[in-house]
Amino acid sequence: MLNQEIRIEIRPEQIVTAKAEQKRFDAQKTHNKFNCDTNYIGLLGEMVFDDYLKTKGLDYVWYQYTKQGWDKPDFKINNKTVDLKTTFSEVMWIQKEKFDIYLYAQINKAQTLLKIKGWLSAKEIKEAKDKKTCKVVKRGSRKDYVFEPHFMNDPLEILSATHTKMNITDL
């Protein structure tokens, strides 16, 4: 199934802010999930998505991980926990499903556009893992599960007022 994308412009000042904030965070943390020069894109995705959500009038909270720790979701939207998985990759990577919704966001190489390409519920991820219908990538002791956007739900569904208030509560 091909989903519609939500396309959100990235402002240059958002990139500068995300890099600076991530650098401050990396200097004090004692655990590195994955050390690379692009660690800031997760925060950048959250910042851009937060600005977008402000324009939609949804009931939501953004939990900035650089200030709140790793145990909270990135967002809570209409009482559902949401982890925004931001990457340059053409697929969504997940290690463990512990929140309600996993939202796949891709940043283009020029870093001018954030595209929300799809989402999966924790239940759908668990089913795919159990049925072995997703790709598994092992790196040492780390195991990632990889999901392609054409197997995901349409991102517009999660943000439409009728869907979020009526159907998403069933996930």
Image: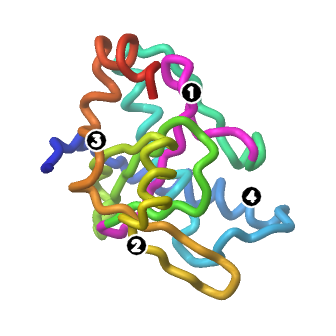
Q: Which residue is mark 4?
A: 25
Position of the C terminus by quadrant = top left
Nearer the observer: mark 1 or 2; the answer is 2
Image quadrant where residue 87 sits: bottom left
Q: Which residue is farthest front?
A: 131
Percent coordinates x, y for residue 33 in the rendering: 69, 69
Q: Earlier in the sequence, mark 4 or mark 1?
A: 4
Q: Identify the disc placed on residue 135.
A: 2
- Amino acid at dot 1: Lys
Magenta stretch: give its range. Answer: 71-90
Q: Which residue is mark 1?
A: 76
Mark 3 or mark 1: whose residue is earlier in sequence: 1
Say what amino acid the circle numbered 3 marks.
Answer: Asn
Q: Which mark is residue 153?
A: 3
* Label 2 secondary element: strand
Query: For residue 95, which quarter of the picture?
Result: bottom right
Residue 130 can be seen in this image:
yes
The disc at residue 57 is none
| Cβ atoms at labels 4 and 1 below 8 Å apart | no
Query: In percent of the image, x 51 and y 43: which residue is there?
Result: 122
Q: Which one is earlier in the sequence, the residue at label 2 or at label 4?
A: 4
What is the distance, in whole Å, between disc 1 and disc 2 at their CAs? Answer: 28 Å
Residue 148 lies, with reference to residue 70, above or below; the image says below
Between the C-alphas of marks 3 and 1, the distance is 18 Å
Q: Going 42% across and 16% down the picture, which residue do you hit?
A: 58
Type of the residue with mark 2: Lys
Mark earlier in primary sequence (3, 4):
4
The kind of residue on which mark 4 rests is: Phe
- Residue 86 drawn at (x, y percent): 44, 56
